[in-house]
Image (tube, rainbow, N blue to C red):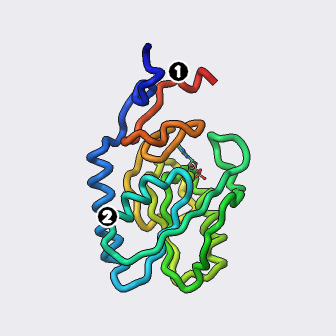
Amino acid sequence: MPGSSDIHHDIEEILIAEPVLRARVEELAHAIAEDYAAKDLLLVGILKGAILFMVDLARALELPLEMDFMAVSSYGNSTESSGVVRILKDLEHSITGKHVLVVEDIVDSGLTLRYLLENLERRHPASLRVCALLDKEKVQDKPLELAYIGFTIPDRFVVGYGLDYAQKYRNLPYIGVLKPSVYAED
Ligand code: IMP
Ligand code: MG
């Protein structure tokens, strides 16, 4: 039975292995802990892609902090962001006066995040910054600034560690590239 019950079967290449992810998350947590030492930190995780990263990051952060979550969806097709974003689930608490760090899985064009940041800025947080696990290498400039970046990766479609293709592969413990045959089946 080739593959069907093996979550690793559809992966062509592992881009970032589990121990490498773990070490980098620790480094990011240390940097964040230093920067926010005397501040009340609110982590805002963007569902669903950022959940694994958010949980590992929060666990490594030896700071008093709060966590909240938002879910957004881009309109249009799934491979390119239109920049028009719909809020599927909003934050449960006010962010006014809080030091907000948005935790995101991956920044591609940056349009989703830009929309989100504009929306959050209108709620008057004390500060608003972004921690993205992955940033895709692109020729054009991104329309936003990322305070913390885990890894810069080539412009390829990746899955794992929270990232999905058609809602699957989020539970892979590493970041990988899918075999082309997986897309061809659709
Ligand atoms: P952007 O608006 O172009 O920056 O798109 C960002 C969103 O698209 C991310 O939050 C992901 O949900 C999704 N995305 C972009 N690239 C990938 C990828 O390689 N794998 C999985 N999801 C991706
Ligand atoms: Mg996302």
Q: Specify the quadrant of the image occupied by residue 69.
A: bottom right
Task: Look at label 2 and name its amino acid.
Answer: Ala
Q: Is residue 7 left or right of residue 142?
A: left
Cβ atoms at labels 2 and 1 below 8 Å apart: no
x then y, percent, for residue 118:
64, 70
Q: Nearer the viewer, mark 2 or mark 1?
A: 2
**Quarter of the picture holding the N terminus:** top left
Residue at 62 percent across and 76 percent down: it is 121
Kind of residue at disc 1: Ser
| Foreground residue among 8 and 118 | 8
Q: Give me the disc on residue 181.
A: 1
Q: Nearer the viewer, residue 54 or 32?
A: 54
Q: Is 92 placed above or below 27 here?
A: below
**Picture coordinates of residue 48 (x, y %)?**
55, 52
Q: At which x and y percent is residue 13?
A: 38, 30
Residue at 53% from the left image edge and 41% from the top image edge: 164
Q: Position of residue 171 (x, y in %)?
A: 44, 41
| Dot 2 or dot 1, earlier in sequence | 2
65 on left or right of 165 = left
Q: Nearer the viewer, residue 116 or 145?
A: 116
Which quadrant of the rendered structure holds the C terminus? top right
User: Residue 92, located in which quarter of the rendered image?
Assistant: bottom right
Q: What element does badge 1 sit on?
A: helix
